[in-house]
Image: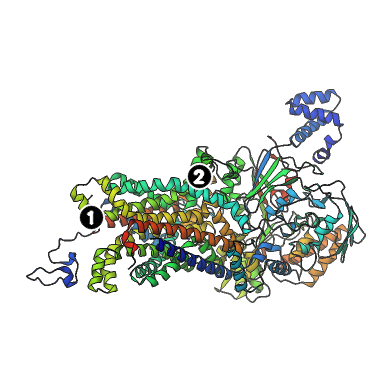
Amino acid sequence: MSYFKRNDPTLGTLSHSDRELLIKMNRQGVSRRDVLTMLMGAGATLAASNALYSGVAHAAENTPKMGGRLIMAADQHGPNDTLDPALFTSAADYFRGRMFYGSLTRLTDSLGYEPELAEEVLSNDDATVWTFKLRKGVEFHDGKSFTADDVLYTMNRHMGADSVSNASSLVTMIDRWEKVNDHEVRAVLSSPNADLPIALGTFHFKIVQDGTTDFQTAVGTGPYSVKEFKPGVRAIGARFDNYWGEGGYLDELEHYGIGDSVARLNAFLAGNVDAMVNLPPKAISQVEGVDGKEIWSLQSGAYVNIAPRLDMEQSSNMHLWKAMQMLQDRQRLVKGVMKGQGSLGNDQPINAAYFDHCADIPQRDLDPDKAKWHWDKSGLGSTAVPVTAAEVAPGAVEQCLFMQREGKKIGANFDVKKVTTDGYWGSVWLKDPICVASWNMRPTANIMMTLAFEGNAAWNETRWNNDNFNQLLVDVRGETNADARKQKYCDLQTMIHEENGMSLPMHRNYVDAVGSHVKGLTHVPLNNFGGAESPVTLWRDDA
Amino acid sequence: MTSLILRRLGIGLITVLAVSIIIFFGTKILPGDAAQIRLGQEATEANVAALRERLGLDQPVYMQYLSWLMNFASGDLGTSLSSDVPITNLISDRYQNTIIVSTLTALIGVPISLMLGIMAAMYPGSVYDRILTFISVSLVAAPEFFTATLLVLIFVFALGVGNAVVVGSADGKGFFELLAHFALPITTLSFVIASQLIRMSRAAVLNVMNSPYIEMAILKGVPRKRIIFRHALLNAIGPIVNVVALNLAYLVTGVIVVEIYFGYPGLATLIVQGVQTRDFVLIQGLGMIFCMTYVVLMLVADIAAFVSNPRLRHPK
Amino acid sequence: MNKPPKTEHFVAPFEEGISFEELQDAPPRAGYKPTMAGWVGIVVVTFWAFIAFAGPWLAPYGENELPFPDAYSEFQVPQEGARLGTDVEDRDILSRVMFGAGRTIGISLAATLLAYGMGVVLGIGAAVSSPKVDMVMSRINDAFLSLPTIMLGLVVVAAVGSSIPVLIVTAGFIYASVVFRLSRAIGMEIMVMDFVESAKARGEGRWWIITREIWPNARMPLITDFGLRLIYVILFISSLSFLGLGVQPPQADWGSMVRENLGALQYGASIIPVLAPAISIATLTVAINLVVDDVSAHGGGKLSGRM
């Protein structure tokens, strides 16, 4: 029922029987004219009838059908595929996580949150105590009931100095979790965080059963149970009949990785798989031209950047990094490399996909004259400037190569060293004087800036440390006045744009491809396959 | 003979041990380690240190090697550092694919290639020989992924037969079903090994043809065919078996491009992933298996050489 | 080597320490006369060798230059300003093929020569040495051979990065193992032949045996193998490119060009981007083999043309 309200408010106002009748008529192939005649005959106006008809057609398309099987092709896979939510690293892990597990809250397309395993989420006035009322009657795949003990066990795995969780930095402000009763838990924070429910809806906070230590299989509350899981080979989920909510429409959902993009595209076009991640942008027009195949694109704040270490000798040279910013061939990256599936980057991370995006900052573009001016001032002449790059995301290497090419024209000598992606994050990133990085979007601008730009953040790539910025960043978390908030976020973004030193030439969309028979796509812009939220809602139109 | 074989086996064991040391210390010099890679970009120092301890990576290097060696000697291949799954599980998920593909390719590709090469040696300089040489050389000239792409375009997209990637699992399929399941990878690999086998068998036979006793047989008027099959072939077996053995080893260990391209996980992909995640336990375990495979195949090649050339049995 | 003075009595060759063909009245040895096929091979190889040297000067554009900077379309069809069209990053294919010639041929040739130098010397050395030395060398070699080549390449590149010297040395060492095994096998076969046994019985030294008995008989199969080995080195490096480890962008190399333009077969307006480098590799390797085959068939072997 809620499905209709979500998709078409008009339809939601009809009575249940009228709605069913309309949908049945549509399914039986009754023509638009006949339906309109019937509705107008019953007293509706032409406009209303039209709206109703479109709503019905739309709803009929969107009424999930049960049954069938889908095969989804990811790109990364390997022996380090894991079913332990705390250790999830790849988009594939996230997708499997959503297949098999549930979490307290779920993120929406607009990056707000919805209740999932937590029916109600309440906080005190200054967002330092959060209470979660848990849903009753939820079962794990093995029949055990979901209770507060499971939540506590799960959450405690992310806390503490000896936690191996990838997401522990998102919950450092939590002092402890408390059990109020079997269906209520409370988180007590040591500093305010209005966005805690959003953080808890992200990939790593999937709820596991109390006491689980062996993750060779996944016993969760998700719409599918593990039929098969072989790391680096394939994962198959079978519908869990006792799923508490709406979702899990397929009989089986298969997910595996095809690392090579050409092979993945071939498999998709040949129909061997129903959906693929990371469609090479240059193949977009071909896929669009094929009947029965579509693009699944999410406009996102994800980006690639080049970060110079401001605390190392050559890379701290202000005129050097300003020249680099002027040499960025932004248009070519968006139009040439991403084929328009992206947006121009403006050397700061918060683009239009974020709620708090500031539109007032002037857009930088390729400017050889300004670049030359800065280059001459830098005093570097023809000295080689080493830049380390790896194919960590589309555009990551290209941005350096384009910069190198433009640089040659003004006498700059960038020595681009491409290294392998394996081991990149451990041995190159955050260590080399100038290197590339790739960032996924975060649910809020504050989270993004705290993770990567706060003076003492572990992932502050340039080591830029501005006390005003740091202070304002904390300050704005408690700001309730809308105008003041807007101004403060503009200030924050402007500071990064002017002083941080990194070149951020492009934001990229997540571009996947699906067969037209695949429905129930989600659009959470945090990752591929609809922010990895799609397993719950996927269904087949031709089952 | 038996003592020779036993000696060879003993030597093989030494080789395997030497390889284990080379691999272990060789990969230790690589930057990055399993814990760091496993946690990826988003990990903090504390996370990594905690995982490192859990995996036993904080122990001194020689201790890690020795504990691995002791486990290996008792048949325990250990647990993968990148996924906590026992190595034997990872291997058992994949060795089936590799064995099936390499066996089928060997059964089909090897006899055909050898036949073609020997036939070319029967009529050197003829049109047949020239054409065959040309084809086998052009086949070899294309990188595997290029051949694979062409085959996919021709068969899957133009003709509509076969799959662009290997779909589903190979469990419970009969011989012909397996042939269909792995059709394109087998075809690609057959092309790849064909060129080497054709040329080698042709060259080996021709080389033998230059010997005095063959000249004698020609002068005696023995028909060409009989010379080749009765006299020349037996002496050409040494180098031919050598090449076949090398190619079989390649089919097990070196077909990563085909595995990646057709999307089926096999042992070659596994070891490359092991290197990429610095999973020493995985690399060691697989490295041992590859080494033992190779040693066995080379032993077979050596035995064939001994059998065919009695002079080799008596070391100088 | 001068011919010995004419004598009156018959001198058995081995008394003077010379071979049959060097005798005064030995039949004249045929020089190398290439056949039609051989000429084709020689012409093509010379052509590519010329391009390898002169390519960078003759190419219409730089290897990383854009013929049409304001357009953002890749895989364009051949047209005015880009005779073979553009590649995946809008660059001129003709220029990149010319730049790539030098790089591909240079790297592969250097690596193969390195592999041959090491492999032949060590392999034949092992064949003539004492069994103990032979055993040690063979075992070390076997250890290398048993490791998958791609894995070795991966490990090396991960450790020291991918640059041209690294590629040459890595490929050289990897293929040296194969050449070692091959030359040792050939050497062993020759060592157990009668004429070697008799040479040893005469007391000939090792060096004599190597240069006078082994080398003349081994060189044909080895030269034949050289051509094939060169091709394998080219393909090995392009397999590394497939995994992202070979010659790094934006440098042009035929193998990596095939890899990066592979998508053209599926969704390019023109398929020349991927065919051009592939055909270059193919023509070069076929030509090399034509020459090698021709030399081995007509270059002085005894029964080569007869049957």
Chain letter behind tag 1: B
Q: In this orientation, does residue C127 appear?
A: yes
The spot of residue B216 in percent (x, y) is: 20, 53
Above or below residue C256? Residue B46 is below
Looking at the rendered structure, the secondary structure element under dot 1 is helix
Q: Residue at x 48, y 41 (%)?
A: B154
Q: In which quarter of the image is the N terminus of chain B?
A: bottom left
Q: Where is residue A502 in the image (x, y as percent from the top left)?
A: 68, 66
Is the residue marked by circle 2 packed among few (<14), some (14-19), or many (20+) residues within 10 Å? many
Question: What SS does tag 2 mark?
Answer: helix
Q: Quadrant of residue B90?
A: bottom right
Counting from the top left corner in percent of width and height, residue A378 is at 62, 74
Q: Which amino acid does label 1 sit on?
A: Tyr
Colouring mode (rainbow / by chain / secondary structure / one colour) = rainbow
The CA span between labels 1 and 2 is: 44 Å
- The residue wearing badge 2 is B184
Locate residue A87 relative to residue A260 in the image: left or right.
right
Q: Mark 1 points at which residue?
A: B213
